[in-house]
Image: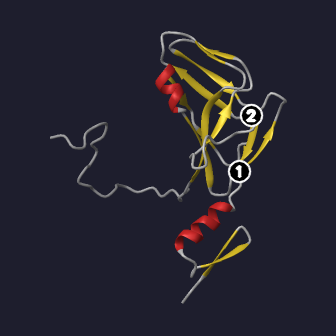
Amino acid sequence: MSADIVFNSETISETEPKAKRVKMAVDNVVLKFAKLTAEALTPTRGSKLAAGYDLYSAYEVIVPAKDKAVVKTDIQIALPDGCYGRVAPRSGLAVKNFIDVGAGVIDQDYRGNVGVVLFNFSDKDFKVEKGNRIAQLLCERIYIPELQEEISLDKTERGDGGYGSTGTK
């Protein structure tokens, strides 16, 4: 028995090859955004298969050595249903300048100015120029389960070992 899947008002037959079904579903996902000021730049992808959209600084900002700063993009976003936004580091900034990204979750219902928390692990101040790529935005599926309190949980072989405990004796 075959069941059709309705995705964004389009019917996708279950008899279609899986690769085609996945491509059709992905093709219909939209990330909406709005520029809040004239300084805002449209997010871009570095290549056709890049995982995320590059986010740009709308302002010049100094991230002090061994400190942090919030860098505004002056865009707001509307994430696709069932997704949250993850603000992730750009590998070049991390490798070349010891710049990392923190506080990287954007909830689906957030409509404010997207800011990026940059941590500077260097001994030198880091200057962000207006228009620099500062992070990347990934849209990730999220599952929000019901919360169920238990008196105790099942025992596992791992138990409460954490923080590098696996693979050690």
Marks 1 and 2, how far apart in space?
15 Å
Image coords of residue 57 (percent x, y): 70, 27
* Apparent side of residue 161 relative to residue 109 in the rendered image (left or right): left
Quadrant of the image occupied by residue 24: bottom right
Q: Is residue 103 above or below residue 147?
A: above
Residue 60 in sight from this viewpoint = yes
Counting other residues with Cα less than 10 Å from the Cα at mark 1, is it few (<14), some (14-19), or many (20 or more)?
few
Q: Secondary structure at mark 2?
A: loop
Counting other residues with Cα less than 10 Å from the Cα at mark 2, is it few (<14), some (14-19), or many (20 or more)?
some
Quadrant of the image occupied by residue 39: top right
Image coords of residue 100 (percent x, y): 52, 27
Q: Residue furthest left?
A: 169
Q: Residue furthest right?
A: 38
Q: Which residue is mark 1?
A: 31
* Apparent side of residue 67 relative to residue 113 in the rendered image (left or right): left
Amino acid type, callout 1: Leu
Give 56 or 83, whichever is nearer the viewer: 56
* Apparent side of residue 25 relative to residue 90 in the rendered image (left or right): right
Residue at image point 51% right, 20% down:
97
